[in-house]
Amino acid sequence: MPSLRTLTILSLLAVRDTFALLDSQNNTFNSTFRLTAQQIATANLSADTVQNLETAIQFERSNNAGYLIQDDPFYILGDEYDLDNLPPQGTILKVEEHTNLSLYTLPNSLSMSRFLYVTETFNGTSVPASAYVLWPYQPRSFKNITKCSGNSSDDQQVYPVVAFAHGTSGQTQACAPSGLRNLWDQWNEPFPIALQGKTMMSPVVAPDYAGLGVPNGISQYFMLPAQANDLYHALAAAQSQWPSLLSKEFVVAGQSQGGGVAWSAAQRQHNRPVHGYLGTLAASPFTDVLAAIAADNEAQNNGRVAGIAQGLNTVLPDFSLSDWLTPVGVARWNLIHDIKGCGVASGQLSAAEGGALQILKTGWNESWSANWYRSAVMNGGKDFAGPMLIIQGTEDPNANEPVVTKSVNETCELFPEAQLQYIRYHNVTHTPVMMAAHHIWMDWIHDRFAGLEVPKGCVQQTLSPPRGINGAQFRGWMSQTWFVEYDVYGI
Ligand SMILES: *[C@@H]1O[C@H](CO)[C@@H](O)[C@H](O)[C@H]1NC(C)=O
Ligand SMILES: *[C@@H]1O[C@H](CO)[C@@H](O)[C@H](O)[C@H]1NC(C)=O
Ligand SMILES: *[C@@H]1O[C@H](CO)[C@@H](O)[C@H](O)[C@H]1NC(C)=O
Ligand SMILES: *[C@@H]1O[C@H](CO)[C@@H](O)[C@H](O)[C@H]1NC(C)=O
Ligand SMILES: *[C@@H]1O[C@H](CO)[C@@H](O)[C@H](O)[C@H]1NC(C)=O
Ligand SMILES: *[C@@H]1O[C@H](CO)[C@@H](O)[C@H](O)[C@H]1NC(C)=O
Ligand SMILES: *[C@@H]1O[C@H](CO)[C@@H](O)[C@H](O)[C@H]1NC(C)=O
Ligand SMILES: *[C@@H]1O[C@H](CO)[C@@H](O)[C@H](O)[C@H]1NC(C)=O
Ligand SMILES: *[C@@H]1O[C@H](CO)[C@@H](O)[C@H](O)[C@H]1NC(C)=O
Ligand SMILES: *[C@@H]1O[C@H](CO)[C@@H](O)[C@H](O)[C@H]1NC(C)=O
């Protein structure tokens, strides 16, 4: 009998710190993608990188729920909409009430909707974007949770909403979590939030960050306030579409890039309050993004910095990709856009022939644009709307713990009355912190919906497992030895 199979990509498999040949798992990957000779020559790809990139693209394509996202008519906005004259931000544009889940790998009992809505770029421009709602079979009820419609004349239960900010999936149109079989973040956040009846069973409203999904041009990757805009406008759009099902009250949650987005959202909430806000969970959050980049992991460094650079010219008109990237770096990022690769594919190009090629220009990090980026996107040292729970692994090689701790400390020193709880998990890495801290963050979200008060002030603690860490599974960034795979056999 074939073993259980499901498909998935692991978000941070994208940028590995080793450069090894990949073998195609061709019984599950189903793509015939091949690079052209010209693409290979222009991006100066070695034979090994060609094999790895083709395998990575095949893998990514096999994770789409049926259509490639760029071919899925759902993401195309109708002709009736004029992009220069969109309705207000947060307006719903298109709704797929019941997504056909036969090609997704969702847990049983969940259902899904997708929608297009109007969001807001870093600079405030309106653009269309996509999002999903993951619906539990039955909501858990909370006394303090009220409908958006304000209609209390029926006793239908209302779903308490979690606005969820996804981790990095990639930078092109092809990388929208709503069109991927496992919604990208799968068992780390959206599935348990929608499933765990004892604590929550909340629907998850999750934007695909603008630029992923709807063909808008460029993704403003890691411009965290822009992604926080996506989170708020997607939430408002969903609440307007399903006013008698979704609660007015909401909790913000995210991990990794999404943790940075969540923290940024808490700062946005302070500056632009939205009614119904109950608090923020920021897990392994990016705070000082450029400082968090590991000096000893060139591929990671290349991938994130180049990913930021490819969108920065939509924010800073005087910036161009070649300000930070070498010619071969520019050629490789143009190739990613050309072939609509996502994080796994760009990770192969960022590995830069095992470091033989230079992708980032010397001195990029001391340019005016890098300085601008640092201060514009920084989390921490700024006022925010609490309560906020931050969870962080001490061995995180990605959103490094010292950088996060520094941001927490700066915030606590400036705002000693802020409701901030910071929990570090000894020996835990980037994404596994979601598993290590499962009951803590699940209970925390539950308590917000239950209306529990959080005392003022900063609380910091560090936790370790009672048995020690020996034998626990913490391999690499993702520390995961499995994929969620699609069952092609129907068993
Ligand atoms: C996978 O590819 C290898 C090498 O081309 C081939 O020998 C094998 O039969 C393929 N497996 C499946 C399940 O297609
Ligand atoms: C692979 O794609 C082909 C052609 O689209 C299709 O007939 C086949 O069923 C697919 N195989 C798998 C395992 O999905
Ligand atoms: C192309 O890549 C090879 C190493 O794979 C390197 O020696 C060569 O300098 C590169 N050429 C350019 C133009 O970057
Ligand atoms: C859902 O998608 C599957 C696979 O593409 C298709 O066979 C089925 O007819 C679809 N169901 C509905 C209700 O459209
Ligand atoms: C309130 O809900 C009831 C039952 O769902 C419905 O019949 C009624 O029209 C609603 N009233 C308003 C003002 O939305
Ligand atoms: C976006 O805002 C920044 C300041 O925050 C400004 O420097 C930049 O020129 C603006 N970009 C556009 C496209 O308006
Ligand atoms: C920029 O990078 C170089 C080389 O890694 C390093 O020596 C320098 O301190 C960095 N500058 C800043 C401002 O981080
Ligand atoms: C952060 O604050 C804690 C508690 O005040 C302190 O023990 C720690 O040394 C500080 N760490 C950094 C990096 O500032
Ligand atoms: C676990 O963390 C402690 C304290 O940070 C450290 O001393 C120890 O070496 C770590 N153990 C492993 C196996 O990483
Ligand atoms: C509901 O919220 C109010 C105000 O936040 C609080 O005083 C009250 O205790 C809450 N009730 C319950 C049942 O949680």
Image (tube, rainbow, N blue to C red):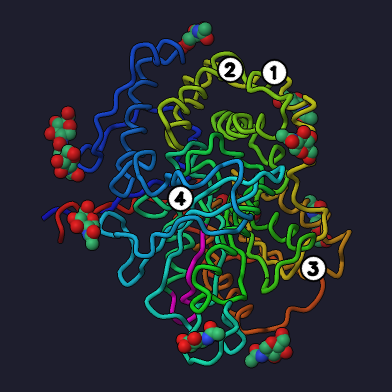
The region drawn magenta spans 196-206
Q: Residues within 10 Å of mark 2 (few under 14, many from 20)?
A: some
Above or below, 64 against 99 in this view is: above
Residue denoted by label 1: 362
Q: Quadrant of ligand 10?
A: bottom right
Of the pair 138 and 186, the residue shown nearer to us: 138
Above or below, 15 against 479 in this view is: above
Say which quarter of the image contains residue 405.
Answer: bottom right
Specify which label sits upstream in the sequence, 2 or 4.
2
Q: Residues within 10 Å of mark 4 (few under 14, many from 20)?
A: some
Kind of residue sitting beneath label 2: Gln
Say which quarter of the image contains residue 358.
Answer: top right
Q: CA distance from mark 1 to mark 2?
A: 9 Å
Residue denoted by label 3: 458
Q: Which mark is residue 479?
A: 4
Specify which label sits upstream in the sequence, 4 or 1.
1
Specify which label sits upstream in the sequence, 3 or 4.
3
Q: CA distance from mark 3 to mark 4?
A: 30 Å
